[in-house]
Image: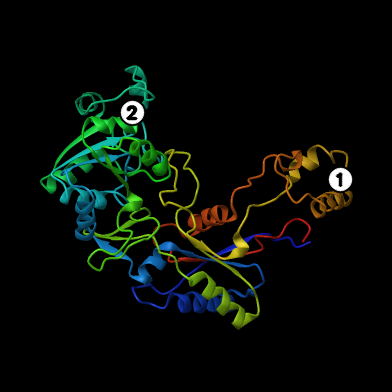
C-alpha cells in the first residue's frame, strides 16, 4: 500500500491577459512543473483552472455603462428596488454603481442579521436586547441609524450600509434602506425589482412574479447577451462577476470547450486521460466570521465527465471502532480492505458511510483548489491533483 494519498500542487503560470492562449499556457506550465518537481502525469489526475483566468483570457468584461444600459432597457419607472444583495465591495459595489447610474431612486432591501453568504450587517446581541425578531420584524432606516449605525464588518472594518449609500449619492441617485427577511416588503416601495441574491434567487423571483404588476429580474438576467459589444454570460448574467477596475467588471466564464481541449491535448502528449475542471469560489464556511465562501453561482461551471457524481465511501473509523473493534494490525488492515473492495454501489443511508461527505466531486475538489490558490498573490491559478480517486486498498 502506498503511504501517500491525495496530492495537490499549485502550478505557477505566466501572468495571463486577454487573448492569451490559456490552453497552451496550462499545458506548458504543468509539463514544466512535472519535470521540475519530478512527478509523472497519470490517468485520473485532475487539472483545475480558476475561473478568473478563464474570464480574463476570454476578455469577458463589461463596463458600468453597459450594465446601466441593460438596466434601463428592462426597468422603466426610474425607481429600482434591489432585493437581498450581498455585502461585498468586490462583488456588488461596482454593480450598484451601474444600477445607480441607471436610476433616479433606489430602495435596497437588506436581509439581517447577515446577508445570504454570512456577512453581518448589525450587532446580533443588540438585536436580541431590542427584542427584534428577524423572522417577522422590519427595521426602518431610521431605526437602523439609531441602533446599529456604529456596526462595522468584522474583516473590512466598513459599515456597508454607508458604503452603499455613498455609491448611490455619488451618482446623484436617491437611496433608502429597508431591513427585512421578507422579499415581498419591497412591494411597499416600487414595482421595479432586481433580485440580487445568489442561491435563493429563483425562489424569490418566483414569489415576486406572482404579483403581475411587478417587473422582476435577477442579477442572472442582466447581461445575458452583449450590450454595445460588452462581455456577457448567457446562463448567469452578472452572477459571479468581480470588480476589475473602478468602472469595469470581469464576468463569470461562458460555456467553453477549454476543459475538453486540455484533456484531449494531454492525452495526445502523454497517453493519459486526466480530468479537467474550471473552479470558482469554494463551498466552505469561515468559522470566525461565519461567512460562507460561495459567492459564485456554482463552484464549477465546466468540467469533464469523469468528475460527475459524488464519493461513495466507507467510514474507516466507524468500521475500526465497531465491526472490527477486536481486530488489530494486519488482520484489521485486511478486513477493512475487504470491506472497501466489496462495498455497495450506493452507501447512502448505510451505517458504513456515517460521517462521510457525499457532496458532488466538483464541489469538494473546487473547495480544495480555492483554498490552495487563494485570491491573493500566490500566483497559482492552476491546481494539479493526484490520487484523489484512490482509497485504502490501492
Q: From the viewer's side, name the closer residue of 80 and 388.
A: 80
Lateral position of residue 76 relative to residue 41, left or right: left
Could you say which disc has been placed on residue 328 in the image? 1
The structure residue drawn at horizontal position 36% and vertical position 38%, both measured from the top left corner, is 115
Residue 159 in sight from this viewpoint: no
Q: Quadrant of residue 182?
A: top left
Q: Nearer the viewer, residue 375 or 208?
A: 208
Q: Which quarter of the image is occupied by the N terminus?
A: bottom right
In the rendered view of the protein, which quadrant contains the C terminus?
A: bottom right
Q: Quadrant of residue 305?
A: bottom right
Q: Residue at x 33, y 28 (%)?
A: 123
Q: Which residue is mark 2?
A: 123
Residue 85 visible in image: yes
Under circle 2, the secondary element is loop
Tell me where residue 136 appears, x and y as whole percent: 36, 22
Can you tell which mark lies on residue 270? none
220 or 130, which lies in front?
220
Relative to 39, residue 197 above or below: above
* Placement of 342 over or under 22, stated as above or below: above
Which one is closest to the eye, mark 2 or mark 1?
2
Amino acid at each position: 500500500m502506498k503511504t501517500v494519498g491525495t496530492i495537490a500542487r499549485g502550478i505557477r503560470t505566466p501572468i495571463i491577459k486577454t487573448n492569451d492562449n490559456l490552453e497552451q499556457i496550462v499545458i506548458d506550465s504543468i509539463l514544466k512543473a512535472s519535470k521540475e518537481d519530478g512527478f509523472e502525469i497519470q490517468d485520473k489526475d485532475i487539472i483545475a483552472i480558476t475561473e478568473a483566468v478563464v474570464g480574463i483570457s476570454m476578455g469577458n468584461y463589461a463596463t458600468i455603462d453597459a450594465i446601466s444600459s441593460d438596466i434601463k432597457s428592462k426597468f422603466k419607472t426610474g425607481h429600482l428596488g434591489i432585493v437581498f444583495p450581498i455585502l461585498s465591495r468586490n462583488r456588488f459595489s461596482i454593480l450598484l454603481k451601474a444600477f445607480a447610474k441607471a436610476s433616479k431612486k433606489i430602495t435596497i432591501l437588506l436581509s439581517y442579521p447577515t446577508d445570504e453568504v454570512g456577512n453581518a450587517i448589525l450587532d446580533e446581541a443588540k438585536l436580541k436586547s431590542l427584542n427584534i425578531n428577524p423572522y417577522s420584524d422590519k427595521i426602518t432606516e431610521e431605526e437602523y441609524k439609531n441602533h446599529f449605525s456604529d456596526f462595522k464588518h468584522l474583516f473590512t472594518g466598513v459599515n456597508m450600509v454607508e458604503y452603499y449609500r455613498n455609491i448611490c449619492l455619488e451618482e446623484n441617485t436617491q437611496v433608502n434602506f429597508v431591513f427585512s427577511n421578507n422579499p415581498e416588503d419591497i412591494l411597499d416601495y416600487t414595482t421595479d425589482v432586481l433580485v440580487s441574491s445568489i442561491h435563493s434567487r429563483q425562489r424569490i423571483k418566483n414569489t415576486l412574479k406572482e404579483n403581475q404588476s411587478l417587473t422582476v429580474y435577477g442579477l442572472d438576467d442582466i447581461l445575458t447577451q452583449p450590450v454595445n459589444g460588452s462581455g456577457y454570460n448567457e446562463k448567469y448574467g452578472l452572477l459571479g462577476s468581480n470588480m476589475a477596475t473602478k468602472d469595469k467588471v470581469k464576468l463569470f466564464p461562458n460555456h467553453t470547450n477549454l476543459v475538453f481541449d486540455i484533456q484531449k491535448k494531454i492525452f495526445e502528449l502523454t497517453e493519459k486521460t486526466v480530468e479537467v475542471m474550471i473552479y470558482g469560489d469554494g463551498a466552505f464556511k469561515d468559522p470566525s466570521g461565519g461567512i460562507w465562501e460561495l459567492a459564485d453561482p456554482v463552484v464549477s461551471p465546466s468540467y469533464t465527465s469523469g468528475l460527475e457524481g459524488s464519493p461513495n465511501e466507507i467510514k474507516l473509523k466507524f468500521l475500526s471502532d465497531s465491526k472490527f473493534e477486536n481486530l488489530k494490525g494486519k488482520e484489521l488492515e485486511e478486513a477493512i480492505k475487504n470491506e472497501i473492495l466489496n462495498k455497495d454501489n450506493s452507501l447512502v443511508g448505510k451505517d458504513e458511510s456515517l460521517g462521510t461527505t457525499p457532496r458532488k466531486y466538483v464541489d469538494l475538489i473546487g473547495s480544495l483548489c480555492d483554498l490552495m490558490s487563494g485570491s491573493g498573490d500566490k500566483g497559482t491559478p492552476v491546481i494539479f491533483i493526484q490520487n484523489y480517486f484512490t482509497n485504502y486498498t490501492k
